[in-house]
Image (tube, rainbow, N blue to C red):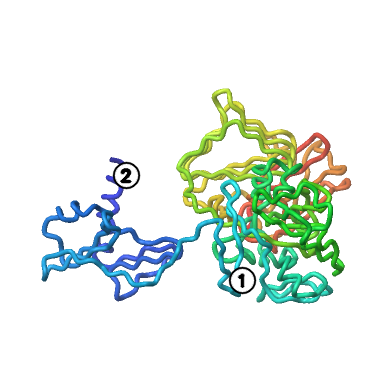
Amino acid sequence: MKKLSFFIALLLLFSSVLFAQMGINTDNSLPDPSAGLDVKFINKGILIPRMTQSQISAITTPANGLQVFCTTDSKIYVYVSTVGQWKEVAYGTGTITPFSCDNPITDSRDGKTYNTVLIGTQCWMAQNLNIGTMILGSSGQTNHSAIEKYCYNNDESNCTVYGGLYQWDNMMQWSITPGVNGICPTGWHIPTDGEWTALTTFLGGESEAGGTMKEAGYAHWAAPNTGATNSSGFTALPGGDRGGSGNFVNLTNAAYFWSSSQDDVTHAWYRELICNDAGVGHGSIDKTYGWSARCVKNATQSIPDNQILQNITTSNGQTTCYNATQTITVAGGATTFNVQNGGSVTMIAGESISYLPGTTVQSGGYMWGYIAPNGPYCLNPSLPSAAATEDKIPVNSEQSSFNVYPNPTSGNFTLELNGDFPSSSATIEILGIWGEKVLTKVLTGDRKCEFSLSDRPSGIYFIRVISGSNAASAKIIKQ
């Protein structure tokens, strides 16, 4: 009843608009002058009323031009008053088949076709991406207006078999947002570190997932190709890598896959599969290496109204995001929610987040919540905007750890340690809202240092300072 009353109130409030023109869209554009109702989406359609044949026949005095979908014969009908009948809308011969994972997709940009595979709840490309114009391995990928790629040994035929090799910035198309579309086709994105972790966890963990992911046999992999069964259908191929100095190594011996999550400003997380091991390597490396890229399908599930997070552990190296349009409830009722050292959790809710007994964050682990009535949510991550706060924010109520100022900042800011907080070998990290490292600096006795976010997008960032067993964190806003 509450929702109905609210809807009626909206109708009354905007009645002058409803009886003139209405535009329904996501880009705030005005309706076309010729249309009373202009609906514009790139990923949604319109559903007209759906009813049985007997229900359609029971409509009294239908208006001329009234349209319905008949569920009895799966056809559209229009009422024509001049003949007093519902007339079937004739279908043409053209068809569009909805995408279903495990079927191939065609990249409209260059016509290349890629196999796909459903692993758990994730839809992955089952081939390495091969998009862009080949440049020599001796050159850096720096063209911001076009996609560039390396082909092993500067041979295009190697790209045809093993896919292109990409430097991280080029693959991301110069973004630092985890889960960005990057060089993937529309509707797909570069997998985050967390999505890679979800994949290997579903396949039995990093110690054995590699065997299920590698193409079996020796057509492309060098012997012994340990444990390779390709039971997952992922069909990993050993495309080797283009080293930071421009050399090519490890074709047929190793597959290196980028994630879209950076470790810091110069390093990003990756996965590695090699010919003599059944496991999956996981680490971070300089972004200038040229490595393979896979794409994962954008999530299509709706964001839940409410989430209850219980008996969950986020371990070292994992970055996880949870969202709900209304509330998130964490632990409680003799359950646990644990963030271990090196783990990072973001929670985004439209109304509230409740941390109940059983919620623990170990030293070196990080968890933060964000109330965002209109998003953005984890399915479409971007840095949220934020209102201005005070110019100088202490980390805690005792004001004994460190200050950052000015805050908000237009780019440059100062961090100053307070009181007895130890400064020798203190590590300072700047993280984005999704837990990705943006900047890292080690202090060697200084109690004040300067930082710059001038080349970063506006939004919320987090600062954490670690010195031995001491740790503290704070929020800074880049305008």
Q: In this view, which residue lies farthest toward the top?
A: 334
**Where in the figure is residue 293, as x and y percent of width and height?**
69, 61
| Image quarter in which the C terminus is found | bottom right
Quadrant housing residue 366: top right
**Is residue 95 shown to the viewer in this render?**
yes
Which circle marks residue 3 in the picture? 2
The crowding category of the residue bearing disc 1, from other C-alpha atoms within 10 Å (few below 14, some 14 to 19, many at least 20), is: few
**Residue at point 58% right, 69% down?**
107
Q: Residue at x 80, y 76 (%)?
A: 136
Indicate the secondary structure of the residue bearing disc 2: helix
Q: Is residue 398 left or right of residue 139?
A: left
Asked if the residue at tag 1 contacts the one at tag 2, i.e. Cβ–Cβ closer than 8 Å, the answer is no
Which structural element holds mark 1?
A: loop
Foreground mark, 2 or 1?
1
Q: Residue at x 77, y 52 (%)?
A: 273
205 or 360, nearer to the observer: 205
Residue 296 falls left or right of residue 91? right
Q: Which residue is mark 1?
A: 112
